Image: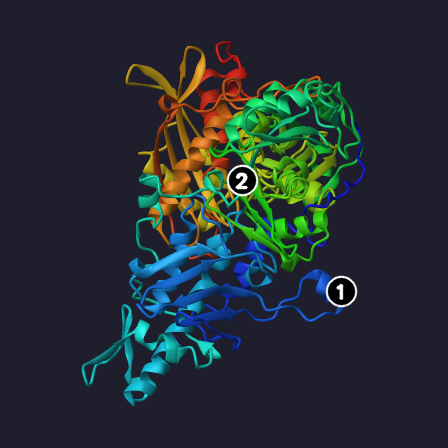
Amino acid sequence: MHDHARPTPDTPFPAARTSDLSRLAAAETARIEAAAGAPVKLSRRLFMGAAGLTLAVALAPRASRAQDAAGAAPGASLSAFLDIRPDGTVELRSPFVEGGQGIHTAMAQLVAEELDLDIAAMEVVTAPAGTDYQILGGMRMTGGSSSVRGGHMTMRRLGAAARSMLIDAAAEKLGVPAGELTTRPGEVAHEASGRALPYGELAGAASLGEVPADVTLKQDGFRYIGARVPRMDLRDKSTGKARYGIDSTVPDMLHAAVRHAPRRGMAPEAPANQAEVEAMRGVHSVHLLPDAVAVCAERWYLARRAVEALEISWTEGEAERPMPADFSSAAFRQALDAADGESAEAEAKGDALGALAGAGTVIEATYTAPMLVHGQLEPPSAIASFDADGGLELNMPNQAPEMFQAAAAAMTGLAPEKITVVSPGLGGFFGRHFPYADSNPWPQAVTLARATGRPVKVLWTREEEFLRDAMRPVGHAKFRAALDADGMPVALAADLVGEGPTGRWWGAPPGKDGSAVEGVTGKPYAIPNVRVGQRFVANPAAIGYWRSVGHSMHDYFYESFLDELALAGGKDPMALRRALLADNPRLIALLDAVETLSGGWRPGPYEMEGTTRARGLAMASPFGSEVATIAEVSLDAGQVRAHRIWVAIDPGSAVNPSTIEAQVRGAVALGLSQTLLEEVVYEGGEPLARNFDMYQILSRDMMPAVEVAIVESGAPMGGIGEPGLPGVGGAVANAAATLTGVRARATPLINVDFTSQG
């Protein structure tokens, strides 16, 4: 339990890439944003499509670390393919996967803005796997709140380049200088003669030209950027036409249901009644997998009925990461608390340890948060299909097609170009759909397709998903802070104990694993002496990224502890934050915005609508955005109830305000759910909850009113999908402490007795 050694990276993610996902997107944003408004260099790459103009815009050459080390020339970092058809409609192949976050609409807004096209003429599909689409610092994924901030300038360049090529084609056809032409939505116009040519009519000629070396992007007069454009996918989702992985089929497909071992690391013995089950109606075959049994059948419900009928005995297997038979959540928390030794430094300024040693007033606290499942609406599934030439097609929910392509190549021995990855729309993101080894069904689908000689679709039940999910890790933080004679913080030290997913899957060493410390590192408060460290303790469970990653719990830890410091120093929580941010006008403006949105700062307690209420405040700086959150709570039968939550978010600039508001509200719902209710409990190496009957999530009647203010400071663009979540826990816990006097240092709050005064 007290293993402080550097973690060894597992294989599903590329070992050469050790940076945090969000930092890659931030670096890419900074790189391309510098070119905004200036001529943008484009490589001359052109593809002739049968339908019309097919354009590929390549970024400046950028090598991966591995390529740099080997001295190999990098491949083109292709942003997207844009097909302008003869009928004037346009297909955009997005590098990012749509999963309800509105990314396809945002990509269409950005391209249509510079192309000068009615967005209704656009169709957006997810691009196939391929190095051309690795536009985030040489990689591709949909996550880390990186899609718009990491891809917006590339999409704009794409639209601007296509518009320029269409103007050149029109100039040739009309016999006029290109400088005399302009565009209207979907057509090139020559105002002097009153002539106009639709884009579809020009597409063929434009495809014979060169991609311009320079394009200049629009600076004002935006039609779509910053507008409340309705989501392009809403109608199909509202009418049942949208297709997800769970809906996918291929010809001659077998369906497979699986039963996993109750504990990771166990293996099945031959079922006692295998022959009897194989004789059941519709059953094709029974298969033993490393830690599961599977039944293939002509229909999924027949496969499920058969796999549940198998009489299976489990024995200890040879898993790389077996779960100890005596593992329990309670014992692991005790092990984290007892862990000692030097922590690896993640952030430092001044001399925090020296200041603490000489301080007259020192405040200490330990905060914890449990493992969580992802619990996305759509259970995992995957279809594996081998073709006659030995190629493999994988059709499965995913957030990173090339990662799955590489993992499948490693498993099968096939060259990556022999593996096609089909990326359907996702029925939930939250960091669930990365190649977390045995936490995904696709390796099972590949194994079964090879064994049966037919395409196989594996669909996990919710029970199997709960058993094999790559969960959010346990959070554990030990804080110490010193106050001066005026009650102001002058030193803060924090040790984060445990393991983060970036260390597990990407090999980031302790102290360099942002997922293990973010939300405690990177805080903007002007405390002169700070030290944050990570004390590595391996987590036996399968862990993964969860919405807002480390911020999901660490900002709650920090912001709640900051309120403890305010109380100890005799400060109002809002006043303390304003004092610590006095030299940060961006964040002072954000505090002004959330205070105005909430009708004024009033911590309480106060009476309203027959209940006694209080308010709490928290801030967060996740994924390049800044957030301030105020929550209003009361007690209902001894439990915390949130009535209203106000969120002011500064993403720098906004592409679609409606999408931002929707994403913040969804993030608040998930943040409140995990704060109040959610918890994975292990006993005997097994999770107790196997479905939502034993894993509580927020119900509709518990959802508060949420108001959102968008502050556009003009700072470099930040993320949207996750930043609304991290402030919720701290704001709610701080409000509950003001209301009851009980300081909750552990989530979920349902486990806290708020009826005894603190």
What residue appears at the point 53 percent right and 24 percent down from the top-left corner? 678
Closer to us: 31 or 697: 697
Marks 1/2: CA–CA distance: 32 Å
Q: Position of residue 102 (x, y in %)?
A: 40, 48
Q: Position of residue 436 (x, y in %)?
A: 65, 40
What residue type is disc 1 on? Ala
Quick one: label 1 or label 2, which is nearer the N terminus? Answer: 1
Residue identifier under label 2: 548
Q: Nearer the viewer, mark 1 or mark 2?
A: 1
What residue type is disc 2 on? Ser
Residue 142, above or below 613:
below
Q: Is residue 154 visible?
A: yes
Instruction: State the quadrant of the N terminus.
Output: top right
At label 1, counting other C-alpha atoms closer than 10 Å, the crowd grade (few under 14, some 14-19, many 20 or more) is: few
Query: For the residue labelled by badge 2, is the local secondary structure a helix, a strand or a loop?
Result: loop
Could you say which quadrant of the image residue 90 lies in? bottom left
Query: For the residue labelled by badge 1, is the local secondary structure a helix, a strand or a loop?
Result: helix
Residue identifier under label 1: 69
